Image: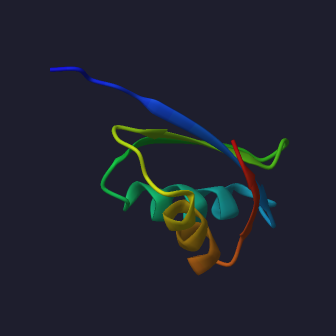
Amino acid sequence: MFNKKIKKVMNVEGMHCGHCASKVENVLKKIPSVSKVKVNLDKKQVEVYLSEEVENSVLTEAIKSVDFEVTNIS
């Protein structure tokens, strides 16, 4: 069985503290395919590691649900 990992880097506006980072991390970890989340407050970036492809809109809506804005996904 082939075990692939997908990494997406999202720029997220509005994160200012550890509490913000926790909110983002927790909401993304609720998505079944998400295996790991790393938040970098200084760069305003979130790295998401996935076990299978997830539409960018799913990730964006999750972030939006905790009052932050995704400005870019790569």
In the drawing, does residue 30 fall left or right of residue 22?
A: left
Name the image quarter holding residue 61. Answer: bottom right
**Looking at this rendering, what residue extends furthest in the left direction?**
1
Coordinates of residue 71 in the picture (x, y in percent): 79, 60
User: Which of the two residues, 23 or 10, is positioned nearer the viewer here?
Assistant: 10
In the drawing, does residue 52 fall left or right of residue 74?
A: left
In the drawing, does residue 36 fall left or right of residue 22?
A: left
Image position of 51 with respect to 31: above or below:
above
* Colour setting: rainbow
The image quadrant where one finds the C terminus is top right
Coordinates of residue 70 in the picture (x, y in percent): 73, 63
User: Which of the two residues, 57 or 48, is positioned nearer the viewer here?
Assistant: 57
Please name the residue shown 34% across and 37% down the image: 51
In the drawing, does residue 47 fall left or right of residue 28?
A: right
The image quadrant where one finds the N terminus is top left
Coordinates of residue 37 in the picture (x, y in percent): 52, 43
Coordinates of residue 8 in the picture (x, y in percent): 59, 40
Please name the residue shown 46% across and 33% down the image: 6
